[in-house]
Amino acid sequence: MDWLLLLEWFIKSFVLVLVLLGGFAYLTLFERRVLARMQVRIGPNRVGPQGLLQPIADAIKLIFKEEFTPAKAEKVLFLLAPILTVVPALVIVATLPWGPDIQIGEYTLKLYIGNINVGVLYITAIASVAVYGITIAGWASNNKYALMGGLRSTAQMISYELSMGFCFVIVIMLGNSMNLIDIVNAQRTVWFVLLQPAGFVVFFITALAELNRAPFDMPEAEQELAAGFHSEYSGMKFALFFMAEYTKMITLSAIIVTFFLGGYLGPFVDELPFLGPIYMAMKIVVLLFMMVWVRATLPRIRYDRLMEFGWKVLIPLSLILVFVTSFGVLLAEEYQQFAISVWVVTSLVSLGIGYWFALMVDGMLRRKSHA
């Protein structure tokens, strides 16, 4: 029985990694086509029908591209850094439920690899490991610009992870559990995005900062740091950093879906369990489109404003949302007959607080622009 269980875990892991790697490849095509449509230009359309073979062409180019290693680089750490960045992006989804249990004869197929009671803590622990890869990449390159880029990206990720952690607390309170399956099941009545919409927005913003995506894409600030921590990387080593970013786009979108958008839940999912992964994929694609939309719309934030936004706006806002959510949970449990009214008021209060913070940020930016 133990061997069968190990074989099941291996097959699930293998399939999940293949899906993530395939998703990473075609997410690059998806982004380039969407950006081209939004910016009224032509995207990749020559390699294969409608450009569908463009990711394969890019992979072949990177595989055969010559790699350079700086003469005085720390070669072991220089090689290890891309691996430390990409591996957490793959293993972080091990506890995410992708659908309900599917009964196949006498066999029950569980659409997750591991079900642990502290799934939220597992996600936070694994997500924090990627910071080491960026720091090591900048230091091991023996390049001052790469080191500065690595330190800047690390400071950004750590700063915004604090706000993300408070959003985790909000989800734990709403779901009354750190188990991801329990959190999904707690949203059968109403998705958490409706109970705490401002928390969803804060989580989405911190996810962009965690990914180093626009408008928080400091590593891509070529005019300042010659591409940041990965300046000295080329070929497949650079491809691993590229893979880590786009794979984490998928995994963080899946986490947001699980925490705020009901996970795999949807119409008729209990009667037709195979709809669960389909609903999950559809929600993930919507969030990926939003990330691409943000990149096509917003300019890069200046670094001092980026850090000020994280420390002076998002952290206080997320702390206030934690207190508002805790009051909502206590009042809903104390006055169960008025639970709906309590959550409506809580949702409106959180939206009002978020709007007030948005006005404060707008005023702060206007004052600095005039100065």
Image (cartoon, rainbow, N blue to C red):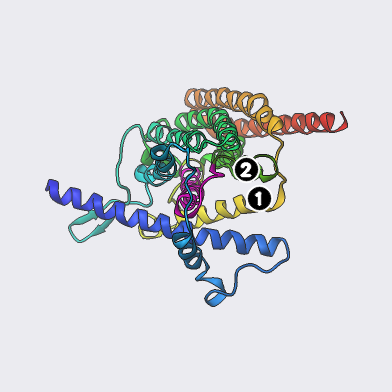
Where is residue 62 drawn, in percent x and y?
A: 48, 59
Q: Give yes or no for contact between labels 1 and 2 (Cβ–Cβ under 8 Å).
A: yes
Mark 1: which secondary structure? helix
Question: 313 above or below 256?
Answer: above
Q: What stretch of residues is rendered in magenta?
A: 230-258
Mark 2: which secondary structure? loop
Q: Residue furthest bottom?
A: 49
The residue tagged 2 is 217
- Pick the front one: 34 or 181: 34
- Pick the front one: 242 or 249: 242
Is residue 255 a member of the stretch shown in magenta? yes
Q: Residue at x 61, y 44 (%)?
A: 227
The residue tagged 1 is 295
Can residue 42 be seen at all in this image of the molecule?
yes
> Viewed as shown, does residue 55 lie left or right of 214?
left
The first of marks 1 and 2 along the sequence is 2
